[in-house]
Amino acid sequence: MTDSCYCHEAGKMAAECDDLGTVFRSVGTSFGYEDIETKFARYKEFKSTWCRSGKKVNFQITDYLAEAGPEVLGDFALSLYMKIARRGDGDIYGPRLREYLVSDAFLERNQPLYVKRSRNLSRSPRGDNFDLRDTYDNLMATGMLGESRNVSLNWTIKENRMRVGYCSTIMHVVAISSLLDNMNVPEHVHEYVLYHELLHLEDGLSSSRRHHTAEFRAKEHLYPRWRESEDWLRRLAAKKVDLLRS
Ligand SMILES: [Zn+2]
């Protein structure tokens, strides 16, 4: 059997959760593992890693699940073991886990933690020129989007040029590049980027790696000034516009 290692260094949690080890050991036994170690790790993203050698496996589980109950952890353990064994359809979110991930309890605990761990977030919707809460309200008023629950709106600290929008669908966190928070960039450009990111949020937790499907593009093109906005973003990326700070 070949070894596979996806292990990263991570700090040990102050209080280890007993449930975690118990659940992972009980599920792992049915997959033939004899030596199973688990601990929570403080990754910024919702990710877990493992190191496997024969019948031994060592997991570092995202600490965003530190308050999850044994049933949710059981679902998660099962999906990870299935993934290691390359069984199943690759959907990492089982029904109970999925229900937990979209709960208020999960978001209330983890969204602030995620924002704190993200070094490039302004932690405020208020920019120098535009307030993302106003932009959000304007978009909602168009009726093109459903209401997003508890979304955290942020500008980036760095003026990202290539990746002008970011969305964590699991944490309900959206960030728009502060490059667009400029009087010389038309207001519809950042509005369009926010619209794009909110569409991702509306799509919810997807196990698919394909995010920009034809269906997604069709919805994106419902934004009246999408073509003009795309054109602006292309010119910004190519540094073809001179943006003097206002
Ligand atoms: Zn996208």
Image (cartoon, rainbow, N blue to C red):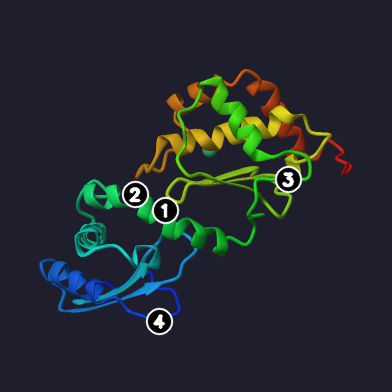
Q: How far apart are marks 4 and 1 (CA)?
A: 22 Å
Callout 4–callout 1 Cβ contact below 8 Å: no
Residue 233 position in % (x across, y down): 71, 34
Q: What residue type is labelled 4?
A: Ala
At label 4, counting other C-alpha atoms closer than 10 Å, the crowd grade (few under 14, some 14-19, many 20 or more) is: few
Residue 234 position in % (x across, y down): 71, 33
245 to the left or right of 174: right
Q: How far apart are marks 2 and 1 (CA)?
A: 7 Å
246 to the left or right of 90: right
What is the quadrant of residue 34 in the picture? Answer: bottom left
Residue 177 position in % (x across, y down): 68, 45
Name the N-terminal-most of marks 4 and 1.
4
* Mark 3 secondary-structure assignment: loop
Residue under the image location 15 percent in, 66 percent down: 27
Q: Which amino acid does label 1 sit on?
A: Leu
* Mark 2 secondary-structure assignment: loop
Residue at far left of view: 30
Residue under the image location 26 percent in, 57 percent down: 83
Callout 4–callout 3 Cβ contact below 8 Å: no
Q: Which amino acid does label 2 sit on?
A: Ser
Residue under pointer 1: 107
At label 3, counting other C-alpha atoms closer than 10 Å, the crowd grade (few under 14, some 14-19, many 20 or more) is: some
Residue under pointer 3: 127
Name the N-terminal-most of marks 1 and 3.
1
Q: Distance between the residues labelled 2 and 4?
A: 25 Å
Q: Distance between the residues labelled 2 and 3?
A: 29 Å
Q: Residue 14 carries which label?
A: 4
Residue under the image location 42 percent in, 60 percent down: 109
What is the quadrant of residue 169 in the picture? Answer: top left
Residue under pointer 2: 103
